[in-house]
Amino acid sequence: MSLAPSIRAPRRALLLALPFMLLPAVVAAQDALETETWTRPPEHIARAVLAPRYENVSVNDMSPDRRFFLHTRSDGMPSMADFAKTHLWLGGLQIDPHANRTRSFTTRGSIGLDLIEAESGRLTRIETPRGARISNPTWSPDGRRIAYFANTDDATHIYVADVSSGRSRQVTRTPVLATLNTRFDWTSDGRSIVTVLVPEGRGAPPAAPPVPDGPQVRLTSEGENRLRVYASLLEWPYQMEQLEYYGTGQLAIIDVESRRVRNVGAPAMIRSVDIGPRGEYLRVTTVQKPFSYIVPVSSFATKEELWSADGRVIATLSERPLNDGTRSGRPGDDNGDASAMRSITWRPDGAGLSYLEREPAPDSTQQADSTANGRASSRRSDRVMLWAPPFDESSRSVVYESTGRISSVRYNADATVLFITEGTGDSQHQYAVYLSDPSTRHTITRGSSEPTNDPGSLVTVSTPMGSVVAMSADGSSVYLQGRQIFENPEEQGPRPFIDRLVLATGEKTRVYEGDNNGVSESIAAILDLESTRLLIERESPTQVPDVYVRETDGSMRKITNNRDYTPEITQAQRRRFTVTRADGFQFKVEVTLPRDYRPGTRLPALFWFYPREYTSQDDYDETLVRYNPNSFPSVGVRSMDILVLDGYAVVEPDAPIIGEAGRMNDNYEHDLRNNLAAVIDALDREGIIDRNRLAVGGHSYGAFSTVNAMVHTPFFKAGIAGDGNYNRTLTPLGFQTERRDLFSGRETYLAMSPFLYANNLTGALLMYHGMDDQNVGTAPDHARRLFHVLNGLGKTAALYYYPYEDHGPATQETLLDLWARWLAWLDLHLAPESAERTTTN
């Protein structure tokens, strides 16, 4: 497949900069950079990129009875052939029109399912349809079956697997419509599945007219419209018709044994479904018209209704207006409307709907009376409500009320205990109330917690009616799970814990505390709270993560045998430095060196970074306490640590931008330059880097900062910038943490736009960009226009556009191609004396 012709231009610029007699390595690098077909890096690099890390097992999707967990089998990175399949972009939705589903089910998903026994680690392979990609595996409420989507080339169907035998059978006869709603649910009795099907007789899909009916029309709306720069929006009337066509489905309840289908209501644009107890009622959220050309589908109006199983609309629960960016279009809280229902959910005891509601306002024609404590009666209470079947006005009742503002409510399994959270931040109060004694509050936590003083979060368990707070067998206590963070994480890593809290007295007992002595532990699953039997994931800097059963006596038993697929990278030398800038500000930098690195050897280096904003040294330092010195090195397909295989040092500096709140970016250019200068000086003193052979790179905001580094400093011979924005005037209403618009922060926007300083570029810049980049603010045209100006200025640059890729390369072809070109670029500009590489097309 040919790339855009414009990438041919760099050859002339590059050749002008090279000696007349080209070394073999330079010739190989030049060939890799110029080819317009997929290329591949040297095999030792390709092996690291393609390593089957996905075969390692972690704990996911525990069964309701805690006996098993699922491992989804992958075949690695998706292919360009999958990404190239026909798809539609409709206002932020990516749809496979041939299969009536979200495009991600076509391009992603697993190739199979494995069932792993929690006690022994014994693996059972689930039988799945040959050639289908598997998604959304979901346990039945009793844990005896697993339902999943099987995605074939032209349809999605639901299959159900039997846990005892591993065999599967198809449940749906009519294909599933998985566009707006991409999941299904079991009924609480485990007998049926609720899903959205392709409606019968819907006719042919709308198509673009052969001749346009007229121009695209856009009119401003009244008031300020602070919209983001969205990548995918509806553009033509026929696309609105396509959205309605591919988004309209038939809600159905399917009996798993007989496969009998019961249609619920008329076809509608169903966004989500939440089935109630016994399957008699459903909460259904639908997308509402009018559609919009200026915001994506996620901002369209929605209506949440209560439906009966025969499709009758019983009540409207909530309505969200179209969020068109104006104040009037933004959904908010109840705005004083006492009828507004908040935090709607099914109660776990099956009694009906639970929700929050403010006490009705007094009649405005009456004088507000004072209560005994002097509070005006117009100050309304907040209430926890129950709405029971048949869901008429007489079946609403107050369960609990408070004078404070309730932000959330949860229940125990039989709904006899409420767990209330009021307030936010330092004023937050989390407490329990036994409904047998609603006047007594039992404090669980109070105020916001610092990272080094984490009280933990309430442990929850799954039930057929959803997640509930776990309580001790005698109902007296709850459990809090957290991660203890220490003041000096360089010396002491985080430690997981579980506390038991007696509600009546507030007494806490630590029932589990993990090991952090050279290892890192995390709680993967709780097998038995009463006896504190757990599944633990355990790792260290030299030990790949594995799963262990922790017995009541604290003994450990390993049940997985995961592998380190790239020891030549994970065993690389790693150093962590504290660097001090000229202004005294201190920050961290991590350096990865080849496994056989000898002290004093100066290496060519790639700086890979992503600046972040802070208000002070203390603000930055607070982020450091979460550092874990005991974690196993993570290596992914885009880990720049792979470069150590070819003798490069990889430098990953924090890049703090410091300033007063709301104006931090006023110091962006100044701090960016000083950060990089300080790191280079520090590593030069350590004898690690050759400061004459440095490259800089980053992705997204890191790419933006890479180009800024190359136009505002003379430090780097080469740069790698991926999916970036290079002109801040094209995000005029804000970006990252910047909340000022271009017109109130004009000088900052201009100073931060490397496009405006392209004439100052030093070094050679390689840019890559996904042609379908959907990230807000990083449209592919940024790279094209920067390349255009660099070419016009006689700068050395290359641009690679990758078809069908989004904000970050994903397909195997693209990733291997990128690694080949990255290495060629670095070889050409940093290490021309290196040995010739083998690069294949």
Image (cartoon, rainbow, N blue to C red):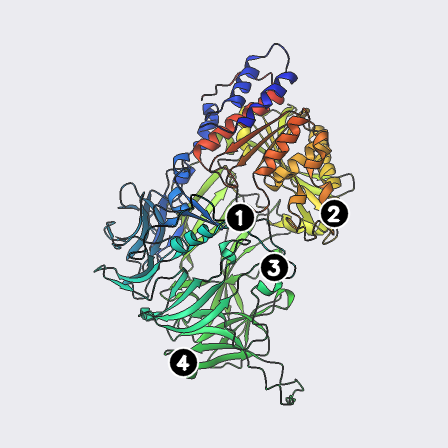
Which label is found at residue 215? 1
Judged by depth in the image, the label closer to the viewer, 2 or 1, is: 1
- Whether residue 553 is visible: no
Distance CA(mark 3)–CA(mark 2): 25 Å
Nearest to N terminus: mark 4 or mark 3: 3
Q: Secondary structure at mark 3?
A: loop
Which label is found at residue 392? 4
- Whether residue 467 is visible: yes
Nearest to N terminus: mark 2 or mark 1: 1
**Can you tell which quarter of the image residue 824 is in?**
top right
Query: Quick one: which residue is furthest to the right in this view?
Result: 583
* Labels 1 and 3 touching (C-beta < 8 A): no
The residue at which mark 2 appears reads as 746
Judged by depth in the image, the label closer to the viewer, 1 or 3, is: 1
Please state which of residues 423 and 573 is positioned toward the viewer in this rendering. Answer: 423
The residue at which mark 3 appears reads as 221
If the image is split into quadrants, where does the C terminus sit? top left
Q: Secondary structure at mark 1?
A: loop
Please state which of residues 643 and 826 is positioned toward the viewer in this rendering. Answer: 826
Specify whether 437 is left or right of 674.
left
If the image is split into quadrants, where does the N terminus sit? top left
Image location of residue 171, percent across then percent down: 25, 55
User: Residue at (60%, 65%) from the top-left corner?
Assistant: 328
Nearest to N terminus: mark 1 or mark 4: 1
Judged by depth in the image, the label closer to the viewer, 2 or 4, is: 2
Image location of residue 121, percent across then percent down: 34, 47
The amino acid type found where label 1 is placed reads Pro
Which label is found at residue 316? none
Nearest to N terminus: mark 1 or mark 3: 1
